[in-house]
Image (cartoon, grey):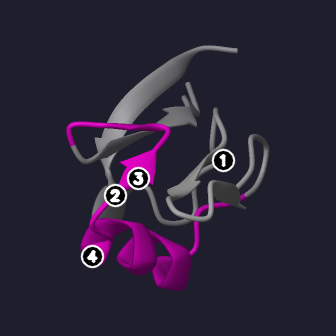
Amino acid sequence: GKTVMLPLTSAVGKTCARDCGRFPPCVPLIRRGERVTAEKAEILRTAGNTFGLTDGQIEVFSEE
């Protein structure tokens, strides 16, 4: 499906389009296909090192 990049705070409730998390330990916090929760978005927003994010934004599936 079509995807869009959103700030973490705007992505809460949306479906994640790629695995993302913090490292170490390099274990995904949110997996592709999972809903972004406020708690996990906040963890990623405040993490020092992350993967799967681009300039602090997360890729989610578009609802259009």
- The x and y percentages for residue 41 are 44, 70
Q: Is 22 or 8 nearer to us in this picture?
A: 22
Whether 13 is among the magenta residues is no
Mark 1 or mark 2, which is nearer the start of the sequence? 1
The residue segment tinted magenta is 35-55
Residue 62: name its quadrant: top right
Mark-to-mark CA distance, 2 and 4: 9 Å
Q: Secondary structure at mark 1?
A: loop
Mark nearest the camera among 4 and 1 is 4
Q: What's the residue type where badge 3 is placed?
A: Thr
**Numbered label attached to residue 28:** none
Q: Which residue does the numbered mark 4 point to in the structure image?
A: 46
**Amino acid under disc 2:** Asn
Give the x, y percent position of residue 27.
70, 58
**Farthest left residue?**
55
Q: CA distance from mark 2 to mark 1?
A: 22 Å
Question: Label 4 sits on what residue type?
Answer: Thr
Q: Is disc 1 surrounded by few (<14), some (14 to 19) or many (20+) residues within 10 Å?
A: many
The mark that comes first in sequence, 3 or 1, is 1
